[in-house]
Amino acid sequence: MSSTSKMKRAATEVDVTLRVNGGAHPLRLDSRTTLLDALRDRLDLTGTKKGCDQGACGACTVLVDGKRVLSCLTLAAQCDGREVTTIEGLGSDGGLHPLQEAFIRHDGFQCGYCTPGQIMSAVALLAEGRAGSDEEIREFMSGNICRCGAYPNIVAAIREAAGGHASL
Amino acid sequence: MQAFEYIRADDVASAVAFVSGDPQAQYLAGGTTQIDLMLKDGVLEPERLVDIASLPLRGITRDGEVLRVGALATMEELAADTTVAERLPLVREALLAGASTQLRNMATIGGNVLQRTRCRYFRDPTVAACNKRAPGSGCAAVSGAARMHAILGASEHCIALHASDLCVPLVALDAVVHIQGVDAQRRVPLTEFYVLPGDRPDVETVLKQGELVTEIEIPLLAPGARSGYLKVRDRASYEFALTSAAVALAIDRDVISSARVALGGVGTIPWRAPEAEAVLRGAPINAQTFRAAADAAIQDPFTVAGTAFKVELAKRTLVRTLETVAGGDA
C-alpha cells in the first residue's frame, strides 16, 4: 500500500485492487467511479471505449472473471480482486489475437470506435460456444451496436475465427 | 449524481439489519438498472449502497418438483441450467430474449424481479411531472411520447411499464419470492409481490425497507406440458418488448385441460391473465378459443394515443403464442 492510501479515507471513497490483464493496481476511488472510467482515466487503458455510457451500445465491453460485462454499468468497487481483461490484454508477445486478425482480414469495422467492444464480446461469444451459425452469432452479438453498419463483415470475422468457412 | 458510501456485506443477517435501520441505504446486486438510475440519470440518490454480491445466495438447485433459484444467480446462469432447459423452457426463452449477454452476465434474478417499473419521463429528472419520482406531481407520459408504456394496471397517475421478460413466465408459473427481514422470513407469491400503482406509483412491491429477496422458487411444469414465450419488439434483438406472452398448456385429446397465461410489455406489473386461463380451460384447440382467450386477457385497458395499438397487438401476440404452443392447425 502506498503512503497516500494510509491517509484517512473519506466515507464516499473506496479502496480497490483492480487486477487487469495480469497486473494488480491498488486504487483509491470515489465510490461512483465506474470500471470504465477507472480503466481509462486512472490506468490509461483507453482501448475500452465510452459510447453511450448507459448500457445500450456495448462499446465498453470487457471480461470480468472471463465473462463479458458492460464496464460503464459496473462500479470499479464491484471488481475488487476480480480478473479484468480488456482489449489491451488480448494477444501475446506483441502479436494480435486471432479475432483481431480476423477483424482486419474481413474489414470488420469502419470508424473503429465500437471495435474493441465487438472483439471482447466476440472472444466471450466463442468461449460460450455460441458461434454455431450466422444467426446465432448475430443474436448473441446483439449487445454490440455498430453505427457504421459493419455487421456483415463482423459476422464473417467471427465465423472465421470460430473455424467456420469464411465467405467473402 | 450524489456521492454515496459503498459497503460490502459479509453476511445476510448483518446486511438486513443495516439496511432495515437506514432509510437512506439500498442493496446493490448486479446494478444494471440501479447504477443506471443513480449515476447516469440521477433519479435514485441513496446515501449508502450495500453490495450483496458476496453473500451465499447464488445457487440453483432442484428440490423435488420445485427449482430454487438464489437471488444472486445471474440471468445467464439460470438460462444455462439443465432443469430450466428441460422443465421450464419458457423461462429459458424469456431469459434469452431479454437484454444482451453482457447485461445477462451482470443482472441477477432477484434484481430482475426487483427492477424498477420505469419510463423515459421517470428517468429524466428535468421532467417535473412524475408521480413515481414526486408523488402528486402528475404524469408527463400520459400526454407525452408514449410507446414503451403500459395499458393494464395503468391510469392517469402512471403508465410506466414493468419491462421484465423473465417475470412474465414467473407469474404464469406461480413463482414464490423468499424474503428475509430482520426478525422473520416470509414467502410471497410473485402474483402478490407487486403493487398496482394506483395514485402512489412510487410504491412498487410489498417489500419493506431492508427486506432482502433471497430466493425465487419456481414450480416445475409437469412433464409433457407444452409452453412458450413470444416477444414482439421494434428490432429483432436487444430491445424491450412492445408485447409478449408466456403460455403453458396441458392438452388432452385436443382439449385444453389446464392453462397458464401471462402478458408482458403491457402491464404496470407482470400481468397474469386468469380470465384468459378460464376461457382456455376445458376448451377445444381452435381459432375461436384462442381469440376468445385473447379478448378476455385484455380487460379495461387504459390507453393513450401512443399505446392504443397495443390492445390488438397484445391479443394477436397471445393468439400466436397459443397457436405455437398448442402446435395444432388452429
Image: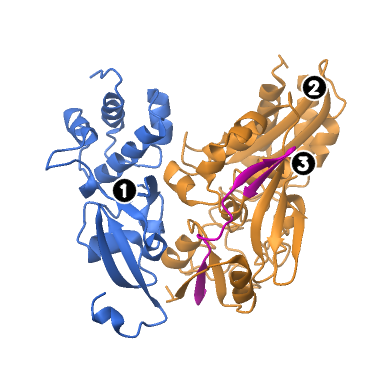
In the rendered structure, the colour chosen for chain A is blue
- Kindly identify the residue that appears in the image at 27 percent across and 60 percent down: A39
Q: Secondary structure at mark 2?
A: strand
Name the chain letter of the residue that bears numbered label 2: B
Q: State the orange chain.
A: B
Residue A59, numbered circle: 1
How many numbered marks have been drawn onto this rendered protein structure?
3
> Does residue B64 belong to the magenta stretch?
yes
Q: Choose top left, top right, bottom left or bottom right for residue A13.
A: bottom left
**Does residue A121 lie above or below B110 as drawn?**
above
> Does residue B226 belong to the magenta stretch?
no
- Is disc 3 in the same subunit as disc 2? yes
Outermost residue toward the bottom?
A8
Q: Badge 2, how many Cα within 10 Å: few under 14, some, many 20+? A: many
The residue pinned by badge 2 equals B251
* Residues shaded magenta: B44-69
Circle 2: residue type = Ile
Position of the N terminus of chain B, as image quadrant, is bottom left
Name the chain letter of the residue that bears numbered label 1: A
**Does residue B39 lie above or below B89 as drawn?**
below
Circle 1: residue type = Ala
- Kindly identify the residue that appears in the image at 41 percent across and 57 percent down: A73
- The mark nearer the N terminus, 3 or 2, is 2
Q: Is residue A153 left or right of residue B273?
A: left
Q: CA distance from mark 1 to mark 2?
A: 47 Å
Q: Is residue B301 visible?
A: yes
